[in-house]
Image (cartoon, rainbow, N blue to C red):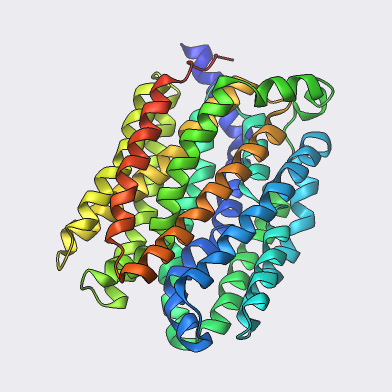
Amino acid sequence: MTMQANAQGSEWARGWPIAVVGQLGIAGCTIFAFATGVLMEPMIAELGWSRTAFSSAFFLQMLAGLVILPATGWLADRYGPRRIAILGLLPYTLSVGLLGAVGQPLWQWWALCLVMATAQGFVTQTIWISAVVGWFQRSRGLAIAVALSGVGLGSFAWPILAAMALEQFGWRWTFFALAAGWAALMVPTFLLGFRDPPRAAAEQTGGGKGAWLASVRSPTFLGLMLAGGLFSCAYFGATVNLVPIIKASGQPLATAARIAGALGLAAIAGRLLVGWLLDRFPTRPLAICVFMMLPLAAVALLNAEGSMPLALLGTVLIGFATGAEMDVVTFIAARTFGTRVFTSIYALFTSVLAISASLGPLLAGYLFDRTGSYAVFLMAIIPLGTVGALIMGLLPAPRTD
């Protein structure tokens, strides 16, 4: 027990800066996802777009990610995540800031979002997680949770900061302010604290095309992709539209933004708790519980008319589920596929999930444009989360290292 504790302590001493930098990097990649819920209404009011047209950019970004993410994952498997990330920090920052320059023609919005998606592929979640997986074995679940809690950090910070910047500068300069603020913190932290995992050089020579093909054909990969896709469609549609959903229930914009900020805190709590549990307990029961939180959140939001506690409950459940879900699927993927081809496998997996996620805002926007309400979309979340939970319960148990 003492030797195991010492090994875990040594692992954390060497690897904790990597997990923290990964957390900041992942938080930065959520600027667009979590700030646009605040910026959507003033943008479409000025530019004359529908919500469906606005949300179509998410789908285009995810299509681009289907090509970009596997490519950058392949490069990270061979040259290390640090070299790939350093190529993307400045281009990604600039591309987010340029979103504020969009004009009324919709093609400009699409073009700027595609540029941002390309740059983001070099600093995306896949790159940061590949380093964390390489640095940790015994405490891998918790380390993954720390890094992925960057999503929760972003979902907490960006709506609040976007609302503050919107009031002071308008929506155009808000994009630049958020991107510049993240870069000012991220760049020096990255240069001082981010290193390639020590096992990467030895493992890059293993695996190969045969191992990669066997992995993507496995029942685990296919099951994770299907369950994660259903979950991603539901949660991302709800997350992007969360501020308008809460506002439609009778809350003012400032209150809706503060309630939405609770999603980030819940996501951080969900990630850390479930990450700790993953190192100690079977994954399937945890996965079922996590996936079922999303239908419960939809029920709460459907009944939140005029009720701040129900709006807050729905938000917290979405946040907890959002945080914990990616912990579960990342942990299973790392345990099942190993580190030799993990980055390229995980990149393909996350790019497919990103396509599914992009359908969520598009579906939510379309249903709102047709019905004038988010109720139908919230009702659709219930079967999506339930089927995902069932699939996760049927997956083979992951191997141990």
Image quadrant assignment for residue 159 = bottom left
The residue lying furthest to the front in this view is: 370
Question: What quarter of the picture does the C terminus occupy?
Answer: top right
In this view, the residue in front, 67 or 20, is: 67
Evaluate whether residue 137 shows in this view. Answer: no
Q: Position of residue 124 (x, y in %)?
A: 65, 50
Instruction: Indicate left or right for 334 with 293 as reference.
Output: right
As drawn, 337 above or below 161: above
Evaluate whether residue 190 shows in this view. Answer: yes
Please give the count of numbered marks on the rendered protein: 0
The residue located at (69%, 35%) in the rendering is 343
In this view, the residue in front, 367 or 328, is: 367
As drawn, 107 above or below 366: below
Q: Position of residue 15 (x, y in %)?
A: 62, 35
Instruction: Indicate left or right for 307 with 144 as reference.
Output: left
The residue located at (41%, 50%) in the rendering is 235
Q: Position of residue 327 (x, y in %)?
A: 48, 36
Q: Position of residue 166 (x, y in %)?
A: 46, 82
The residue located at (38%, 19%) in the rendering is 281
Image quadrant assignment for residue 295 = top left
As drawn, 367 above or below 161: above
Image quadrant assignment for residue 88 = bottom right
The residue located at (83%, 35%) in the rendering is 78
